[in-house]
Image (cartoon, rainbow, N blue to C red):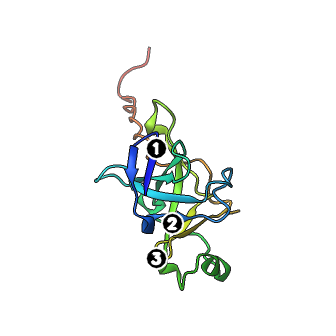
Amino acid sequence: MKIQTSRFGEIVVDDQAIINVPGGLIGFPGQERYVIIRHKPDSPFFWFQAVDDGELAFVIVDPLTFKPDYRIPVSRSLLAFLNADDSEELGIYVIVTIPQGHPQDMTANLLGPVVINTRGRLARQLILDETKYSHRHPVMAPPPKKEQPAPDRNTPRP
């Protein structure tokens, strides 16, 4: 299948690569078919490209790349919805927001992960009510603060 996109031009997508998102993502209920496109070979980022709207794509990333202790609850009802036997079949991604001109300030929505059955090609965006996570979690660590030299205690004060 060929898809015309605003970011990649015309791309050819294998029908088996299409991920179905019944009900769509939050705010985009009419867009239910997506493909994952790797940003660059050595990058942890991907594009979650809508199949039926070439203008719609989200930057996504595995949250464990920048938050190793990130965990979401995986209920039996979620496994059933995604047609998965266990959580080992699931890929967890979060949507990234990159402010124009300030990529160092990018944030990830840890409260709205996209859970994908990688075998069955089904996905659902969750809404977590975990107070320990944020919808604007920094992806990049802030630069280390420069230490101010300690005042020399042997220097007489004026």
- Residue at x 55% of width, y 67% of height: 115
> Label 1: how many residues lie within 10 Å, few (<14), some (14-19) or many (20+)?
some
Foreground of the two, 7 or 53? 53
Relative to 7, is 75 on the left or the right? Answer: right
Q: CA distance from mark 3 to mark 2?
A: 13 Å
Residue denoted by label 2: 92
In the image, taking residue 4 as reference, residue 43 lies left or right, namely left
Q: Residue at x 46, y 44 (%)?
A: 5
Mark number, residue 119: 3
For label 2, the SS is: strand
Instruction: Give x and y (percent) for residue 79.
Output: 60, 79
Q: Earlier in the sequence, mark 1 or mark 3?
A: 1
Q: Earlier in the sequence, mark 2 or mark 1?
A: 1
N-terminal of the pair, mark 3 or mark 2, is: 2
137 w.r.t. 78: above or below: above
| Residue with the mark numbered 1 | 5
- The image shows residue 33 at horizontal and vertical percentages of 55, 59
Viewer-side residue, 153 vs 5: 5
Q: Amino acid at mark 3?
A: Arg
Tell which residue pokes out farthest to the front in this image.
1
Residue 141: percent from left, percent from top:
43, 46
Q: Residue furthest left?
A: 42
